[in-house]
Amino acid sequence: MKIPISVLVVIYKSNRDVLLIERADRAGFWQSVTGSLDAPDEDLALAAAREVFEETGIAVDQLPTGALQNLHHQIEYEIYPEWRFRYATGVTRNTEHWFALEVPENTPIKLSPREHVAYEWLPYKEAVKKCFSPSNGEAILKLFSTN
């Protein structure tokens, strides 16, 4: 069963282009890296780094110190009914913690094919419009409202 605590990581370059990845289980659903904690006590930053590696092949520990930023923002949202089977009976809400990761211009992306089928680098305002989740778009806007 999935834990209803997750991370969202907005991956971006210095030119403010944002990486979006398309879900394998929902064509046309573009998003940033997301994922649930593996254990209730898993460190949020470690979960973010793990999810980034699993979904994009980017090793956060190989990037400069401080590349992964905790945005110190969390939201609670209703889990889509079609995905509730992944959680314990009666769980309908998830708490998501926002992070950002700045990567070098030439960072290679290696998708996990069971999770995502395509990726795109987009100017951040275009990425906001393409995200299927409004809160994902809000996370991108929050990042660039302070940078």
Image (tube, rainbow, N blue to C red):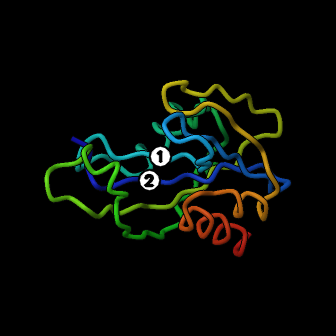
The CA span between labels 2 and 1 is 6 Å
- Give the residue at mark 2: 7
Q: How many marks?
A: 2
**Is residue 94 positioned above or below 44 on the image?**
below
For residue 48, which numbered disc appears in the image?
1
Residue name at image x 32 percent, y 56 percent: 81
Q: Position of residue 56 (x, y in %)?
A: 60, 32
Indicate left or right for 91 with 78 as reference. Answer: left
Q: Position of residue 143 (x, y in %)?
A: 66, 67
Residue name at image x 67 percent, y 70 percent: 141
Image quarter of the C terminus: bottom right
At mark 2, the secondary structure is strand
Q: Position of residue 103 (x, y in %)?
A: 72, 43
At mark 1, the secondary structure is helix
Q: Position of residue 88 (x, y in %)?
A: 16, 49
Residue projecting furthest to the left = 89
Task: Residue type at mark 2: give it.
Answer: Val
Which comes before the other along the chain, label 2 or label 1?
2
Between residue 23 and residue 61, name the one nearer to us. Answer: 23
Task: Residue type at mark 1: give it.
Answer: Ala
**Is residue 74 positioned above or below 81 on the image?**
below
**Is residue 50 positioned above or below 44 on the image?**
above
Residue name at image x 77 percent, y 60 percent: 124
Residue 91, located in which quarter of the rendered image?
A: bottom left
Indicate left or right for 128 with 7 as reference. Answer: right
Label 2 packing within 10 angstroms: few (<14), some (14-19), many (20+): many
Residue projecting furthest to the bottom = 145
Label 1 packing within 10 angstroms: few (<14), some (14-19), many (20+): many
